[in-house]
């Protein structure tokens, strides 16, 4: 059975799911998206993702051409049509069709795309053994330039950093902000553990308000672990007892090496493992 894709107002076959070359999503990266997981046929943190999407839209003066309930219904229909019990949803709102000029207001109708598919995950041994990362030289977009809370279709900043990781043979890249503090990884939020306290950069440091980040902070708090939002330096990462990333695709994954420095004893630490277990339980619940 061919994959069905939601396009604007209906489901179409994958090979009919096409958008115009004049869509400003393509011409300028003008649009927004969400990446959402489906666990046991349930859409994970659905309301939080929808809320973030509408906030991203508002920030860029993009009118999503339907209300939240109608959009959620489209997402649900796409998940059901493709029999996705465990998988991944990509929800995209493009600025829509315009002409060869920046003016977004000439694009009358935003485009709506929902893809629901299976997900490519890191192999299990990556979770058991932990990842190696590097510090990128590409700094995160300045928050006064492109606020990182806007999950925009323009990911070149992160892609340039990701290329550095690929060239170095590392799994991920840590991005720093214009002041030199840790912002986030190219597609994940950053956490460290030091003396049994969890630290994560505040979103003002230039990170997305990650939904997995929020869930993990809640789960840690429930385990009576203190979580502090604080600017982190490169050195803070080097000397951390534990280091992990959170994100929709990776969930909770330990980092065991950065820029040649071994973190802790070179294995994902106890807090990382505990939070990964709690996260697993939470997604299964
Ligand atoms: N920072 C950035 C820059 C991201 O893109 C996160 C943090 C984590 O946020 P969530 O809300 O997912 O916990 C992201 C998320 C992909 C992919 O296909 C990327 C993300 C999510 C899902 C899939 O590369 N980025």
Image: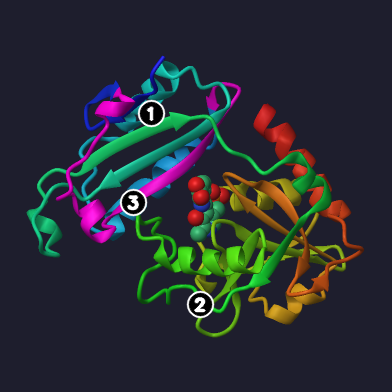
Magenta span includes 2: no
Q: Residues within 10 Å of mark 3 (few under 14, many from 20)?
A: many
Real-space Cα separation, disc 3 to disc 1, in angstroms: 16 Å
Mark 2 Cα-neighbour bin, 10 Å: few <14, some 14–19, many ≥20: many
Depth check: 55 or 82 in front? 82
Q: Position of residue 107 (x, y in %)?
A: 11, 51
Residue 75 numbered tag: 1
State whether residue 39 appears in this view.
yes
Of pointers 3 and 1, the one earlier in the residue sequence: 3
**Residue marked by disc 2:** 139
The residue under the point 25% across, 47% down is 94
Q: Decide: marks 2, 1 in contact (CB < 8 A)?
A: no
Foreground: disc 3 or disc 2: 2
Q: Is mark 2 within 8 Å of ligand 1?
A: no
Which quarter of the rendered picture does the C terminus lie within? top right
Q: Are marks 3 and 2 in contact (CB under 8 Å)?
A: no
On the image, which quarter does residue 10 sit in? top left
Look at the image and give the residue range highlighted in magenta.
Answer: 13-42
Q: How many marks?
A: 3
Badge 1 element: helix
Mark 1 Cα within 10 Å, few/some/many (few <14, many 20+)? many
**Quarter holding residue 146:** bottom left
Can you say whether 91 is above or below 171 in the image?
above
Determine whether, in the image, residue 123 is placed left or right of residue 274.
Answer: left
| Disc marking residue 32 | 3
The percent position of residue 149, horizontal first and vertical second, equals 43, 61
């Amino acid at each position: 059975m061919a994959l069905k894709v939601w396009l604007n107002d209906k489901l179409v076959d994958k090979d009919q799911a096409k958008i115009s070359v004049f869509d400003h999503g393509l011409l300028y990266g003008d649009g927004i998206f969400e990446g959402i997981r489906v666990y046991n046929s349930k859409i994970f943190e659905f309301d939080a993702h929808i809320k973030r999407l509408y906030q991203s839209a508002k920030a860029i003066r993009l009118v999503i051409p339907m209300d939240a309930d109608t959009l959620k219904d489209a997402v649900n229909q796409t998940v059901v049509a493709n029999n996705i019990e465990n998988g991944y949803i990509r929800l995209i709102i493009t600025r829509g069709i315009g002409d060869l000029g920046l003016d977004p207001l000439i694009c009358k109708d935003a485009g709506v795309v929902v893809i629901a598919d299976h997900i490519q995950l890191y192999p299990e041994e990556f979770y058991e053994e932990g990842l190696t990362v590097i510090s990128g030289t590409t700094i995160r977009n300045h928050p006064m330039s492109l606020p990182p809370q806007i999950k925009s279709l323009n990911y070149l900043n992160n892609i340039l950093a990701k290329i550095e990781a690929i060239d170095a043979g590392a799994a991920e890249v840590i991005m720093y902000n214009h002041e030199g503090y840790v912002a986030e990884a190219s597609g994940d939020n950053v956490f460290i553990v030091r003396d049994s306290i969890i630290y994560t950069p505040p979103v003002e440091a230039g990170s997305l308000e990650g939904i997995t980040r929020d869930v993990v902070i809640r789960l840690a708090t429930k385990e009576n672990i203190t979580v502090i939002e604080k600017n982190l330096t490169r050195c803070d990462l080097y000397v951390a007892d534990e280091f992990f990333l959170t994100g929709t695709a990776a969930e909770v994954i330990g980092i065991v090496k950065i820029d040649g420095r071994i973190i802790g004893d070179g294995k994902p630490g106890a807090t990382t493992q505990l939070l990964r277990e709690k996260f697993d339980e939470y997604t299964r619940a």
